[in-house]
Image (tube, grey):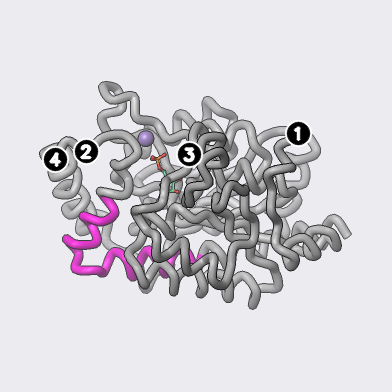
Amino acid sequence: MSAKAYLSVSGEVKTALGSGKAVVALESTIITHGMPYPQNLEMARQVEAVVRSAGAVPATIAIMDGRLCVGVSGEDLERLALEGHKAAKASRRDVAALLASGEMAGTTVATTMQIAALAGIRLFATGGIGGVHRGAEDSFDISADLEEMGRTPVTVVCAGAKSILDIAKTLEVLETNGVPVIGYGTDDFPAFWARTSGFKADRRIDSAEELARLIAIQNDLGMGGMLVANPIPEADAWEAAVIEDFIAEALDDAQAEGIKGKATTPFLLQRIFELTEGKSLQSNIALVLNNARVAADIAVALAALKN
Ligand code: PSU
Ligand code: MN
């Protein structure tokens, strides 16, 4: 059997792909582990609506009922959102085991890219990517997202990397893995809640059309993915120094509680949510919607190139 034998693509997404229409993949760890219920479900539905209003078809990806599901919506989306942290967090190494067990799982950036590529989807919107964690020189905690971007031909639109990560090291590993890092309308690499990280993107591109041309060439060359870093909208952004204080406190708490490995990112997000009295979540949702719109614009431009 081939990998495709495990794919379940929704009718709408299948039709869109078959007719060369723009499709945007969406991850689901952000639903299960990134946000509390019911905001996670509301966010997932809003993201779908934003993608649609920009003229593309949304394809939320998750692992459910022993299948690699592309285009999760309606009741299934609700099941996933309700399951929350009880669902598995599917990184690359978990996929086979989850298909075997039939467990429900949110897919990380790495796994969503893998499944999107299998389904023939070239664009993917998320909030933030995983990266090199602070202290990685001791813990070796480097997200599988960084390796996946080097090998899988899917462009990921994000709002940069959170400064719960070591951003300098994250950018170095992206370079090592051959991943172009594009600032969308900015020279800077953004830091999720903040519009700048103090580091530069590899190059700057200001329009969806220009990005689509670049993606087409990258694909023609048979190379891996690209990272598009789209800063959080001004109105929802935090001063770097303000959010940094909350991040530092969350990191201290994680260390005190001995949080390690794949539990780290969900723990930090939850803790920062508590420390900011929910305001970090509001910004998180705003930036995800903004990324979904940009990804849809790029997907539409890419579809126009191909037709
Ligand atoms: N950033 C967020 N929310 C998230 C994640 C990142 O703002 O939910 C998730 C993504 O799915 C990402 C994963 O792929 O965390 C990275 O986890 P790890 O560091 O364990 O690889
Ligand atoms: Mn990790």
Q: Amino acid at mark 4?
A: Glu
Q: Which mark is residue 257?
A: 4
Is residue 69 or residue 167 the one in the foreground? Answer: 69
Residue 66 seen anywhere in this rendered image of the structure:
yes
Label 2 belongs to which residue?
259
Q: Quadrant of residue 41?
A: bottom left
Image point (44%, 52%), residue name: 29
- The furthest residue to the top: 138
**Which mark lies nearer to you, 1 or 2?**
1
Q: Tell me where residue 187 appears, x and y as whole percent.
A: 49, 50
Q: Nearer the viewer, mark 1 or mark 3?
A: 1
Is disc 4 placed on a helix, strand or loop?
Answer: loop
The residue indicated by pointer 1 is 1
Q: Which mark is residue 280?
A: none
Question: Could you give the CA–CA distance between mark 2 and mark 4, rounded to whole angstroms?
Answer: 6 Å
Look at the picture and state if 195 lies above or below 283.
above
Callout 1: SS: loop
Could you tell me how far apart the alpha carbons at marks 4 and 1 are, in whole angstroms?
Answer: 44 Å
Residue 4 vs residue 221, the one in the foreground? 4
Task: Tell me if the residue at label 2 has its CB under 8 Å from ligand 2.
Answer: no
Q: Residues within 10 Å of mark 4 (few under 14, many from 20)?
A: few
Residue under the image location 57 percent in, 37 percent down: 149
